[in-house]
């Protein structure tokens, strides 16, 4: 495996572990704009890295989580336990895909439609 890819995968795994902890904090303190901004930036970075590396499946899953976080930030959606759980599922999916990528040196095929298409979240504020 390419050293650059290995390093990026390691950094992404560390960011995703931090994201898990931060998202649990967000469930407990949904009105913390600094926390929400930090989470948004981390997901944005993961998405950008995946795009840079030409990993469209990973990029799409990260983009879906980023969109929901942006709606939280912009007041278009209320931070709910259900919505945060869906973001956590997206993060778990990213971890699974990264694990496959590390093992096989290729992004695995898969259907992430249920995570990417999230119209079933709570309505607007």
Image: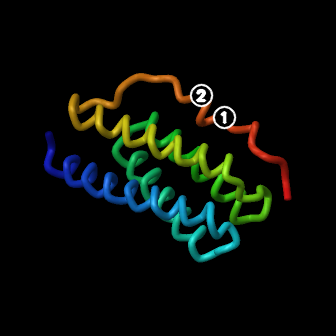
Task: Write the residue at 69% across / 65% down.
Answer: 73
Can you give x and y, in whole percent of width and height, for residue 18 in the image?
A: 40, 62
Residue 117: mark in rendering: 1
Task: Write the residue at 63% across / 57% down.
Answer: 69
Q: Quadrant of residue 75?
A: bottom right
Q: Is residue 77 left or right of residue 48?
A: right
* Vertical position of residue 97 compared to residue 41: above or below: above
- The total number of labels drawn is 2
Can you give x and y, in whole percent of width and height, for residue 33 in the image?
A: 65, 74
Q: Is residue 94 left or right of residue 67?
A: left
Whether the residues at callouts 1 and 2 have beta carbons within 8 Å, the answer is yes
* Vertical position of residue 117 compared to residue 80: above or below: above
> What residue did someone put label 2 on?
113
Q: Is residue 93 left or right of residue 23?
A: left
Q: Quadrant of residue 40?
A: bottom right
Task: Write the residue at 57% across / 72% down.
Answer: 35
Residue 81: mark in rendering: none
């Amino acid at each position: 495996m390419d050293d650059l890819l290995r390093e990026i995968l390691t950094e992404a795994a560390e960011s995703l572990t931090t994201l898990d902890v931060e998202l649990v904090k967000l469930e407990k303190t949904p009105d913390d704009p600094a926390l929400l901004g930090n989470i948004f930036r981390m997901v944005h970075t993961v998405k950008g890295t995946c795009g840079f590396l030409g990993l469209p499946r990973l990029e799409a899953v990260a983009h879906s989580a980023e969109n929901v976080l942006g709606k939280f930030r912009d007041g278009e959606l209320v931070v709910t336990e259900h919505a945060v759980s869906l973001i956590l599922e997206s993060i778990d999916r990213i971890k699974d895909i990264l694990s496959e990528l590390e093992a096989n040196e290729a992004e695995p095929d898969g259907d992430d439609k249920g995570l990417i298409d999230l119209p079933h979240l709570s309505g607007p504020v």
